[in-house]
Image (cartoon, grey):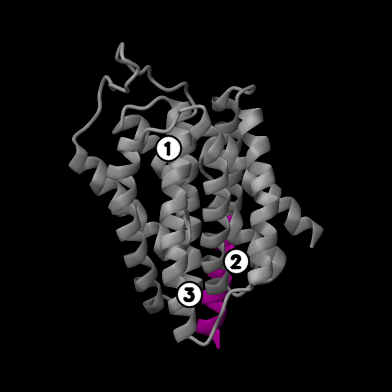
């Protein structure tokens, strides 16, 4: 179990450092280290990541590096999409969900590596408000939030690896603001998906293990505070490139495991 707890620390560190990657790590840790069934692991991942992200956003809120406009335009559609994605999950088998999850990991690796260069500068208004040099229309941000939300609910990912670049490219935020804002959005979407998953699991005669959720959340929250402290002292682009390489390795391994399961079921 101590290996799984190390994974929980890494989950928190990832969220605190990059505002993303927490659920990318949580589902594999719960499935392959704790031994949770796939659908239960996806549901527990949403609860764990939601709690860690909510706690991890507190330092950013104190530092006033959260853009509440983006939380509104990205987060609210994201909650709706997450609820819908969790509802759709009842029609998708566990192995298919994990295969989709692996594909998402590989996509995340590409996005993280491409985003590993320093963010483009943001023009600030003299009054201290955020006026992005290339802020896009609100409806585009809302559409992105809805799409990421569906993905969150379907495969149990917080979507930070998609939210952060969207906030930088569409919302016009700098990297530090995007990370803090991403944590708030992840918390909102994850809790929405978690509540819906409780209903879905109940219909399937399953339930989450509350002690696992509580333990991972507590350890991950400590890791997120450490990640926030470290993040102010290490160049983000170095961390993002290393994380991208890790995602490629993990995504290919999970994809391989599920291809084996599919071929085995066909043979039988």
**Mark in front: 1 vs 2:** 1
- Disc 2 marks which residue? 257
Question: What percent of the width, then of the height, locates residue 39?
Answer: 52, 73
Which quadrant, please, contains the N terminus? bottom right
The residues bearing labels 1 and 2 have C-alpha atoms spaced at a distance of 34 Å
SS at mark 1 in the image: helix
Question: Is the residue 130 above or below the residue 86 in the image?
Answer: above
Residue 17 coordinates in the image, percent (x, y): 59, 35
Within the magenta stretch, is there residue 261? yes
The residue that label 1 is drawn on is 181
Which stretch did the figure color magenta? 252-268
Question: Tag 2 or tag 3, which sits nearer the N-term?
Answer: 3
Label 1, residues with CA under 10 Å away: few <14, some 14-19, many ≥20: many
N-terminal of the pair, mark 1 or mark 2, is 1
Q: Report how far apart the C-alphas of labels 1 and 3 lie in the structure.
A: 26 Å
Dominant SS type (magenta): helix
Real-space CA distance between mark 3 and mark 2, rounded to the nearest whole angstrom: 27 Å
Q: Residues within 10 Å of mark 3 (few under 14, many from 20)?
A: some
- Label 2 Cα crowd, 10 Å radius (few <14 / some 14-19 / many 20+): some
Of residues 192 and 28, the one nearer the viewer is 192
Residue 122: % across, % down: 35, 18
SS at circle 2? helix
Q: Which disc number belongs to residue 198?
A: 3
Query: Can you tell which of label 3 and label 2 is closer to the viewer?
Result: 3
Q: Where does the image place residue 10, in percent across and percent down from the top left? A: 67, 46
| Residues tagged 1 and 3 counted as in contact (Cβ below 8 A) | no
Q: Is residue 100 visible?
A: no
């Amino acid at each position: 179990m101590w290996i799984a707890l190390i994974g929980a620390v890494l989950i928190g560190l990832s969220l605190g450092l990059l505002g993303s990657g927490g659920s990318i790590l949580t589902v594999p840790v719960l499935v392959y280290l704790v031994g949770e069934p796939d659908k239960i692991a996806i549901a527990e991942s949403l609860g764990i990541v939601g709690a860690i992200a909510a706690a991890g956003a507190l330092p950013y809120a104190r530092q006033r590096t959260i853009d509440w406009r983006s939380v509104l335009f990205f987060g609210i559609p994201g909650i709706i999409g997450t609820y819908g994605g969790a509802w759709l999950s009842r029609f998708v088998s566990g192995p298919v969900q994990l295969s989709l999850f692996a594909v998402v990991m590989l996509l995340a690796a590409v996005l993280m590596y491409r985003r590993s260069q320093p963010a483009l500068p943001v023009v600030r208004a003299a009054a201290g408000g955020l006026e992005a040099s290339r802020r896009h229309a609100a409806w585009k941000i809302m559409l992105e939030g809805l799409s990421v939300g569906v993905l969150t609910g379907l495969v149990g990912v917080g979507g930070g690896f998609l939210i952060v670049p969207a906030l930088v490219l569409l919302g016009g935020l700098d990297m530090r603001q995007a990370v803090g804002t991403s944590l708030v959005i992840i918390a909102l979407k994850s809790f929405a998906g978690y509540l819906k998953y409780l209903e879905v699991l109940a219909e399937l005669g399953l339930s989450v293990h509350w002690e696992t959720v509580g333990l991972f959340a507590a350890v991950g929250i400590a890791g997120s505070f450490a990640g926030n402290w470290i993040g102010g002292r290490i160049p983000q682009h170095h961390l993002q490139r290393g994380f991208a390489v890790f995602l490629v390795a993990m995504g290919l391994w999970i994809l391989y495991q599920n291809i084996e399961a599919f071929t085995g079921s066909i043979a039988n």
